Amino acid sequence: MSEANFDPLELRNALGTFTTGVTVITARGSHGNPVGVTANSFNSVSLDPPLVLWSLAKNSGSLPVFEEAEYFAVHILSNEQQEISNRFAGRGADKFKDLDVPNGLGNTPLLADCCARMQCKTAYRYEGGDHVIFVGEVIDLVHSDATPLAFQAGKYALASRKVDETPLLSSQNDQNSAFSEDYLGYLLWRAYFQFHTMARKQAAIAAYSDLEFLVLVTLFHSSERSGNDLSAAMSYEGSVQDTSSAIKNLITQGLVKSLGTSSKQKFSLTEEGREKTLSILAAAKSTESEFLNKLGMWESVALKNLLKQFITETDPGLPHLWENSHDTH
Ligand SMILES: Cc1cc2nc3c(=O)[nH]c(=O)nc-3n(C[C@H](O)[C@H](O)[C@H](O)COP(=O)(O)O)c2cc1C
């Protein structure tokens, strides 16, 4: 009889405060059948000898195979592999369907694109209540610096490193400036301005006005658009922009051509326009990667994720940038 004086849900919630990575652990049965389960009970045990452990529920359909398998492979999933995690957390369906899985030690199926993959030889098995604990000796490993997927309080999470000290943006250290500097509106505006200024330093981008830049890029992503549609597509900036003079300039420069007659007039890129836009996009990408490299990979993923979440949660219904949503004819 257990002496515990809490209910299982409370235990589950308490354990959920321990943030973990997410792994998929695979093995192959003696009849050639592959198995794989998502597991966050994975942990390190020893460096010398190199040992790791994880535990598997006794009601898992894969248990018999893991119990007989001489080898198993641990895949530490990256932030891009949430789908893989969901797939291997399911039951019944063929979890390996359409996956390219080369064979590793003991023909263990191996998954690609993980943060790390360890091929292990089963060293010990222990009883662990409603789970079986597997300890494996790591025989072979590969790893990358991809950003890991995290799991927190029953949900997927993003692992991001903390800076040692939050930098002060101004030299004045009084309470008022500290408040203003912490104000989200100020941070978003300033961040936008600084990013925009950086991008504008690139010659390929500096040659065009903001609207010309946006018209070129929008036309690059959709074959043809009307003037109204182009103007509306820019309204993600907060108001519908009049793009007519930007379009006129681009036509003069031979980058955009007009199709159809006045009421059904549409615009598309010329061949030269396409080439120019490609170099603009490459310049924009290189500014972005220069900045993201300085920020660090984990922080970049976290920043973009949070901005996407912020945009989704505060969206007053702006059109999607490259969607042809405004032309009805
Ligand atoms: C993030 C996450 C972590 C999990 N960790 C474990 C674990 O450590 N051990 C376990 O037995 N099940 C774990 N599960 C549940 C199994 O992946 C799930 O029960 C799976 O369907 C078992 O498959 P099977 O019955 O085909 O063996 C986890 C699920 C998720 C989504």
Image (spheres, rainbow, N blue to C red):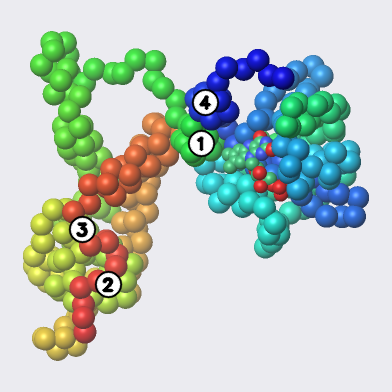
Q: Is residue 104 visible?
A: no
Q: Closer to the camera, 325 or 269?
A: 325
User: Of the residues under marks 1 and 2, which one precedes in the sequence?
Assistant: 1
Q: Position of residue 37 (x, y in %)?
A: 69, 44
Discs 1/3, front: 1
Q: Which residue is mark 3?
A: 317
Q: Which residue is mark 1?
A: 154
Tell me the kind of residue under disc 1.
Gly
Q: Is residue 329 visible?
A: yes
Tell me the kind of residue under disc 3.
Gly
124 to the left or right of 235: right
In the image, residue 7 above or below residue 115: above
In the image, residue 218 above or below residue 200: below
The local secondary structure at tag 1 comes to loop
The local secondary structure at tag 4 comes to helix
CB under 8 Å between discs 1 and 2: no
> If the image is split into quadrants, where does the N terminus sit?
top right
Identify the disc placed on residue 324.
Answer: 2
In the image, residue 272 above or below residue 93: below
Q: Position of residue 251 (x, y in %)?
A: 17, 73
User: Of the residues under marks 1 and 3, which one precedes in the sequence?
Assistant: 1
User: Of the residues under marks 4 and 3, which one precedes in the sequence?
Assistant: 4
Q: What is the distance, in whole Å, between disc 1 and disc 4 at their CAs?
A: 13 Å
CB under 8 Å between discs 4 and 2: no
Quadrant of the picture in which ligand 1 is shown: top right
> If the image is split into quadrants, where does the C terminus sit?
bottom left
- Name the residue at 80% across, 26% down: 127
Q: What is the distance, in whole Å, between disc 3 and disc 2 at their CAs?
A: 15 Å
